Image (cartoon, helix red, strand yellow):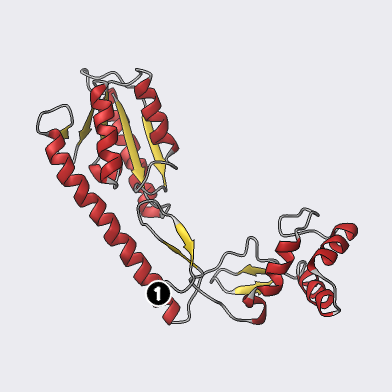
Amino acid sequence: MAAYCRVSTDQEEQLLSYENQVNYYTNYISENPLYEYAGTYADEGISGTNTKKRDEFNRMISDCRAGKIDMIITKSISRFARNTLDCLNYVRELKDLGIGIIFEKENINTLDAKGEVLLTILSSLAQDESRSISENCTLGIRRRFEAGKHKMSTKRFLGYDTDESGKLVINRKQEPIVVRLYQEFLDGKTADYIKRIFEREGIKNWNGGTKWQATTLTNMLQNEKYKGDALLQKSYTVDFLTKKRAQNKGEI
């Protein structure tokens, strides 16, 4: 028997839940004479709405296909998957291999006759819960927009860092590069010409390299944040299940 654990964020209280799940199931299987411990597979800080990015989940499924696991135990359907289709597809595949999944909270064993009927209903509810959470998150973000609050990554935002409160502060080492870019452009030079100047002089970009792209420099020249504005919601999530994002061209 193997155990699967997952928490969907990296917040402190969730990480405690994650550690508790791992410890609980490791002890639960090891101390039960009916089971031979086949390992604990645990994904930390990853959403359950699809399985593409869940490395440990995918490793567990591979081990099931390789015949290393006969039974899986997990806390609940929502820990296993919030996507009804994914959940049912894996349950059916594993069932065909003779591998059952025990959902402890719902008291379901997928090898039982009643298992799949209950699973279809409960996993649909889990998916709907995920949709509700997604909508609430979106609403919260938009309320912050209305209040003039915003968060932005400065990893690739040359010339700025963020302080402990999330406010932008000038990066004094990178500041001359930004000033130089705008001055060269105002003097009539193209982005491609400025790129060659920067590379010839060995000027370092945001990640410390000396290779520049003309498109990067053009984007910097067009970035409204350098004049003190913030244009929010440039992209949006099209589907809460696939997490697919699209450029906002006025739809939202």
Q: Position of residue 137 (x, y in %)?
A: 36, 65
Name which quarter of the figure residue 22 lies in.
Answer: top left
Q: Position of residue 106 (x, y in %)?
A: 15, 41
Name which quarter of the figure residue 21 lies in.
Answer: top left
Left-right relation of 109 to 252: left
- Looking at the rendered structure, the kind of residue marked 1 is Arg
Label 1 secondary element: helix
Determine which residue is flagged by label 1. 142
Vertical position of residue 242 compared to residue 157: above or below: above
Left-right relation of 14 to 157: left
Q: Residue at x 82, y 77 (%)?
A: 183
Name which quarter of the figure residue 108 lies in.
Answer: top left
Q: Residue at x 29, y 29 (%)?
A: 27
Taking depth in this image into account, of 142 and 150 the one nearest to the observer is 142
Vertical position of residue 176 compared to residue 78: above or below: below
Split into 4 quadrants, where in the image is the C terminus?
bottom left
Q: Position of residue 222 (x, y in %)?
A: 67, 74
Split into 4 quadrants, where in the image is the N terminus?
top left
Q: Residue at x 59, y 81 (%)?
A: 229
Single out the residue that lies furthest toward the right.
200
